[in-house]
Amino acid sequence: MSWRDETGAVGGIEVLPFALLVFVAGTLLLANAWAVVEGKVAASAAAREAARAYVESAGPEEAAVDEAAAAARAAIEGHGREPGRMELEAVGALSFERCARATFEVRYSVATVNVPWIGAFGGGLITTSARHSEVVDPYRSGVPSGDCDA
Amino acid sequence: MLMPAAMLVFVVLGAIAVDFAVAFLGEREVSNAAAAAANDVAGAALDRERFYADGAVRLDPATADEVGRSAVAAAGLDDLDEVDVRVEVAADAPVVTVTVSARVRYLFAKALPGGPDGARVEAWATATAEEGD
């Protein structure tokens, strides 16, 4: 048998490298999608913790806002994410008094991987956001009274 | 023939993974909204007339419904469709159950022949108003 003999050769085997590339690109695409999902979960947890920390704070308002920001950062860190990529913002006016609603929105920028042929989504960063809202307990002591009949 | 089929299988599997993740996120969103709403209702919907009449801590169904719906409205479920809120107050205890359901839009499945365009997700949370010392 000479080396030119094609016995045992598989037709179409030359596409295997192409298939491998498609597989790698597809895997990176899915990894990107999952990173965004994880970013959304982290943002959701951060918004929830911020709102909880605010309404449970002993006050005054500035301290409550600081506690909300610290809780959001801790939640992001707890999810293994980078707090520097997080933005925390109060939705509407905050008022630290009984019955007041505190709504926080967290935006988190997820870095995406450069996928072959497709490139990086959103310029390399995809921003996810989540919002959480809670009411300051109407019957708490040590908190200024608010308009509970509104 | 094998290569296009393998690619199609790969794309479909990826689409299923992403769409299931989207549904999972939607379920978490309604779960968070339900928990926050139940917590708000337990704190803010005390039936004051009943409390001043016989000292019993109970929740007022009308106030509970109003507080629960405003809590879910503030939860930012804008990316979900057909959001439905049910607030149920127990008659014999200061307990409220808030159920939130919504429809999640799939990203990829609707592109497949016969694929669904979304899924309905639902979550509920119960909270009890307890008297402090």
Image (cartoon, rainbow, N blue to C red):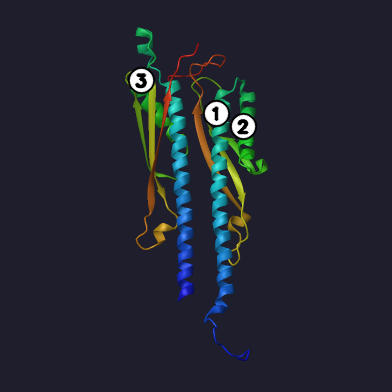
| Residue A39 in the image: above or below residue A27 | above
Query: The residue marked by circle 2 belongs to what chain?
Result: A
Question: Marks 1 and 3, Cα distance to the nearest angstrom?
Answer: 24 Å
Count neighbours of disc 1 (C-alpha within 10 A) and say few if under 14, some if 14 to 19, many if 20 or more. many
Q: Which one is nearer the viewer's eye here, B102 or B66? A: B102
What amino acid does circle 3 point to?
Asp
Q: Which SS class for mark 3?
A: loop
Please state the horizontal and vertical placement of residue B58, each as a whole percent of the image. 37, 17
| Subunit of label 3 | B
Instruction: From the top left corner, tell me how far across and down residue A12 is, in percent.
Output: 53, 80
Residue found at x 59% / y 23%: A57
> Where is the N terminus of chain B found, in terms of image quarters?
bottom left
In the image, B27: left or right of A118?
A: left
Disc 1: which residue:
A52
Q: Are marks 2 and 1 in contact (CB under 8 Å)?
A: yes
A34 w.r.t. B52: above or below: below
Q: How crowded is mark 2: few (under 14 residues within 10 Å), some or many (20 or more)?
A: many
Residue A59 % position (x, y) = 61, 20
Q: Disc 1 residue type?
A: Arg
Return the residue at label 3: B60
B98 is higher (above) or lower (below) than A106 = above
Lower position in the chain sequence, tag 2 or tag 1: 1
Q: Give the SS element for disc 1.
A: helix
Disc 2 on helix, strand or loop?
helix
Under mark 2, the amino acid is Ala
Separation of marks 2 and 1 at Cα, in angstroms = 9 Å
Circle 2 residue: A71
Numbered tag placed on residue B9 in the rendering = none
- For label 3, the crowd category at 10 Å Cα-Cα, with few meaning under 14, some 14 to 19 and many 20 or more, is many
